[in-house]
């Protein structure tokens, strides 16, 4: 008897129950969709499109990829696929990926930053009126370790001193926290055993140079900024879309390819740079890789010239193929707190003979102006992000997640209760 009443009640109220349930699910789904849309708009406004992509990649690698990694690797092994075929752009990242060992070249730069309080000027830096001296530290020579010598080789003390002491032997492994990132194989070819000399000091920039080849120099720049964060500075360095806005000399700046290996942080980029009148523009195809070590509180950026079939050298432009740069960024405290040191070391061979006075003009005028623009762009980026965050927080409608569901649930249960009461009163009559 009770079962029949229960079945009849379900039949009588099934349509109303289903309608109320669907309306309840629809309201909850709409609320969640709106909240997701607000969060996506918020993160895109704060970090930009590139930052949102990096956030999604980090979430994908941490939450979604590990369970599938074993199945994917098994499928690759069974089918005999080659990972080089995964890239449709024809660039072989296995051979062209920049090596992590390149960052070991920054060991002296980090030591220079850490010992700034004890920095003393050498005679040449005093003559050039430099603020700091890199020569004494950068030109130190180290003796080759005994383990690297051949046991059968015997030389006189004078010969041993000449051959076994080198600046290059002072390089040490940085032992970076790369979290499983691929090692890479392409190395920067720098003349480590040539000596640094002071060049000039202007505003907050101190610049030294070192001869790489005949009349071709690499340059090392040091500066500190007290009011920008390392994270914002890294963003300005790596966001190509934003660089097109603040760098008026970048006529073209395009992302050609991205390394598919997670954690590599490697990109292949095309860059056309505007030169003064009477000179052809320079263009570059180069690989970029950056590493952020949370334990050591260091950020490294490495660039090196590369080649790509779809971006050949064009008439009317000078293709720069011999190019490399290294940058180390060290915050005062944390990546999100204001204050940082940075040391930039770069070299490029313009490919055609250029008068020395033009080279000096580019180095002494254009480079400080570019670094100043980069600093101003970082300030503007931080300011615009703060304004967007404020606007987004003010625009957020504070929705009680349980309000809509509880109100609809209460109205539905109340309507059912009222119907039972009405039916009971009608039955009594």
Image (spheres, rainbow, N blue to C red):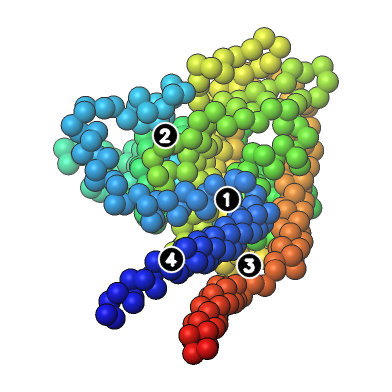
Find the distance from the CA under tag 1 to the CA under tag 2.
24 Å
Query: Which residue has dot 3 on it?
Result: 337
Element class at badge 1? helix
Q: Quadrant of the N terminus?
A: bottom left
Q: Residues within 10 Å of mark 4 (few under 14, many from 20)?
A: few
Element class at badge 3? loop
The answer to whether 429 appears left or right of 100 in the picture is right
- Which residue occupies 44% across, 24% down? 88
Furthest residue in direction right, as rendered: 277
Find the distance from the CA under tag 1 to the CA under tag 3.
21 Å
Question: Quarter of the image holding residue 169?
Answer: top left
Q: Nearer the viewer, residue 89 or 403?
A: 403
First in sequence: mark 4 or mark 2?
A: 4
Q: Residues within 10 Å of mark 2 (few under 14, many from 20)?
A: many
First in sequence: mark 1 or mark 3?
A: 1
First in sequence: mark 4 or mark 3?
A: 4
Furthest residue in direction bottom, as rendered: 428
Find the distance from the CA under tag 3 to the CA under tag 2.
31 Å
Query: Which residue has dot 1 on it?
Result: 52
């Amino acid at each position: 008897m009770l079962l029949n009443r229960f079945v009849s009640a379900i039949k009588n109220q099934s349509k109303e129950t289903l309608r109320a349930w669907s309306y309840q699910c629809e309201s909850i789904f709409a609320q969640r969709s709106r909240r997701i849309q607000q969060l996506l708009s918020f993160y895109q406004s704060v970090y930009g499109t590139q930052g949102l992509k990096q956030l999604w990649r980090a979430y994908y690698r941490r939450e979604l990829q590990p369970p599938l990694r074993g199945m994917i690797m098994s499928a690759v092994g069974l089918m005999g696929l080659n990972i080089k075929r995964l890239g449709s752009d024809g660039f072989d990242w296995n051979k062209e990926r920049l090596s992590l060992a390149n960052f070991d070249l920054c060991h002296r730069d980090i030591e220079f930053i850490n010992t700034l309080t004890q920095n003393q000027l050498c005679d040449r830096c005093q003559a050039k009126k430099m603020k700091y001296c890199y020569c004494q530290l950068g030109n130190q020579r180290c003796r080759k370790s005994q383990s690297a010598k051949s046991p059968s080789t015997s030389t006189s003390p004078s010969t041993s001193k000449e051959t076994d002491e080198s600046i290059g032997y002072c390089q040490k492994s940085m032992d970076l926290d790369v979290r499983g990132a691929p090692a890479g194989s392409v190395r920067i070819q720098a003349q480590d055993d040539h000596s640094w000399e002071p060049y000039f000091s202007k505003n907050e920039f101190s610049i030294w140079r070192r001869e790489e080849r005949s009349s071709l120099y690499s340059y090392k720049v040091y500066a500190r900024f007290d009011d920008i964060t390392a994270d914002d500075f890294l963003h300005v360095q790596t966001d190509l879309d934003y660089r097109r806005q603040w760098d008026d000399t970048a006529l073209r700046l395009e992302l050609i390819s991205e390394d598919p290996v997670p954690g590599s942080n490697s990109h292949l980029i095309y860059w056309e740079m505007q030169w003064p009148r009477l000179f052809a523009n320079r263009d570059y195809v180069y690989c970029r890789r950056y590493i952020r070590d949370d334990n050591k509180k260091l950020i490294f950026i490495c660039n090196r010239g590369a080649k790509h079939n779809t971006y050949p050298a064009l008439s009317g432009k000078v293709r720069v193929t011999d190019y490399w740069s290294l940058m180390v960024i060290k915050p005062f405290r944390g990546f999100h707190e204001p204050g940082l040191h940075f040391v930039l070391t770069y070299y490029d061979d313009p490919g055609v003979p250029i008068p020395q006075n033009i080279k000096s003009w580019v180095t002494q005028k254009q480079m400080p102006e570019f670094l100043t623009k980069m600093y101003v762009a970082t300030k503007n980026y931080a300011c615009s992000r703060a304004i967007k965050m404020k606007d987004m927080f003010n625009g957020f409608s504070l929705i009680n997640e349980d309000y809509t569901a509880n109100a609809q649930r209460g109205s539905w249960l109340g309507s059912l209760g009222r119907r039972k009461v009405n039916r009971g009163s009608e039955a009594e009559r």
